[in-house]
Image: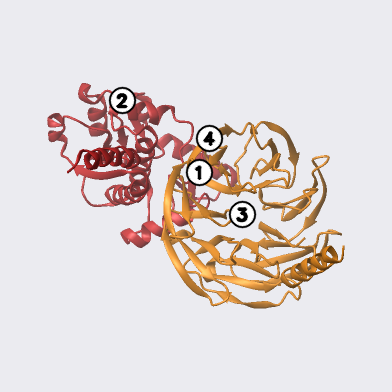
Chain colours: A orange, B red
Amino acid sequence: MKLKQLLLSSLIFVSASVWADPTYRLFVTNEKSDSVSVIDSRTGELETTIDIGKRPRGIGLSPDQKTLYVAISEENAIAMVDVATLEILGKLQPGDDPETFSVHPDGNLYVSNEDDAKVSVIDPKTNEILHEIRVGIEPEPVAASPNGEVVLVASESTNMVHIIDTETHKVVANILVGARPRGLVFNSTGSLAYVSSEIANEVAIIDIEKREVIKTVSIDIDKSKPMAMVLSPDEKTLYLTTGRASKVAVFDAKTLELLSTIDVGKRVWGAVLSRDGSTLYTANGVSHTVSVVDTASNKSTMEIEVGKFPWGLALDD
Amino acid sequence: MTTIQSGLLALLCFLVLPVQAEVIEVELHYVGPTEGSAWLGVQQGLDEANLQGEFLGQKYSLKPVSADELVTLKSVTALLVAADAEQILAVAQSKQFASTPVFNLTSDSDALRSACLPNLLNIGASQKMKQDAEVQMVAKNPDSKAHAQSWHQDFKKFAARQLNSRFLKTQGVIMDDDAWAGWTAVKMLSGGVARTQSTDASVMLDFLKNVAAFDVQKGGAPLFVTQDN
């Protein structure tokens, strides 16, 4: 018993030293206000707005959730914000036009340089670009696998998903997908990834080991332009934002059968799910709001006003 | 070499060869001036098709040909034509190219649209389409002196911002209607080759006419940008 207690207390000690207590803050990039809205996700109250820099889009948290990263593409930089104090800590220089990125489990950022058809790997501790990897035209969505073995990047204009081996930093496979891929999300083991295609109006599942698309479905929703996706913690449900259709599409994650749709604000782009999967938040570009969705009932329960053209979301929970 | 060695070598070849996909060589034919907007648009399209091809195993080249040389061509995947309506119609109507995609890059002639030729692909907006857009604009804003175009350098949505920016960077001039048409035609063709893995003209024509969605950076549906003078 004593040994168990000792083990438990050391575990708690380890986790406390690595992870800060969550602030439950929801961060929203406002592309045309050059700001980040900070919302208390427990109340839905807007806590403050941070002037962040020009054209903020991509947003994400460090693995320890202490630092928020925000891509400010027109300043060719990624701003770092202290999640607890909300102080701007500095700016990373990850090359030209960093539209979005993914934070690797090792803490490095994989950044898509949209105008230069490449991915840059930057170490946020040193602000050093460690690798540059050539990819197709207009790379945008990036996703690091949960085990960190591979990173996916989709080139929007050349309709490919590139698989990058994170050990060699080489592109090991190029998978042709539907026109204008916009969203990427992994399952928890990293064996599968979902890709959404805006112009083709479809979602596909990629088998990472086979390096091929194993399933594709067309989205049967009026005006749908597929964008961001999130997977429920039990991995049974896939949520997809549909742009100007102003709905979230809810799919069976295995069969890609459309189960239901949720009305949210206009021109819905970014999405994030609470850790427990109970609440989905969406950034509604034209409404200038964030919708709060109860995933048990698949209904929007609140719409929170934010800055102009909200694009991406990150939640510290 | 021992039998075992040659056996191993053969096995290695068997294991290695199937994963090294063969590079498909694609020659596109172009009729028109080798300068100016349409030409630059085609060049931009070619650069981008070759970048895509580096990853997917295709290599594109462009062969300018005169209208008189067309009869001598044996194998053609597609024809890109930057000429007047009469010349484009003559090429598209010739028996030789009845199953070959013929892209009209430059003419806004309504006659080319109403000819309903199954192999003629008109990229830009027609006169009638542009007039309709202008009428709609004037109905909304009676003082408007807007004129409709297929493309505009200030167009930003659907990643047009990025396309305008890289065209200007590479070609040194703004992207206009004809440049966009040239780029679009090559993009559609490279998309077709990547997906069908074929350079056969009739396969390409079928793909171009029946494919569900092309991304020509206009968000899907045709859209006409206006400019106040």
Q: For label 4, count other residues whose C-alpha is less than 10 Å away and answer few (under 14), some (14-19) or many (20+).
A: few
Mark pair 3, 2: CA separation: 45 Å
Tag 1, which secondary structure?
loop
Q: Which residue is mark 1?
A: A209
Q: Which mark is on residue A214?
A: 4
The residue shown at (58%, 65%) is A106
Chain identifier of the residue bearing label 3 in the image: A
Tag 4, which secondary structure?
strand
Coordinates of residue A259 in the picture (x, y in percent):
72, 32
Residue B77 picture quarter: top left
Tag 3, which secondary structure?
loop
Eye-nearest disc, 2 or 1: 1
Q: Is residue B228 visible?
A: no
Q: Nearer the viewer, residue B218 or B113?
A: B218
Check disc 4 and give the amino acid type: Ile
| Mark earlier in primary sequence (1, 4) | 1
Q: Nearer the viewer, residue A219 or A209?
A: A209
Mark pair 3, 1: CA separation: 15 Å
Coordinates of residue A163 in the picture (x, y in percent):
47, 50
Q: Is residue A10 above or below residue B203?
A: below
Mark pair 1, 4: CA separation: 11 Å
Q: Are marks 3 and 1 on the same chain?
A: yes
Q: Which mark is on residue B202?
A: 2
Q: Which residue is mark 3?
A: A146
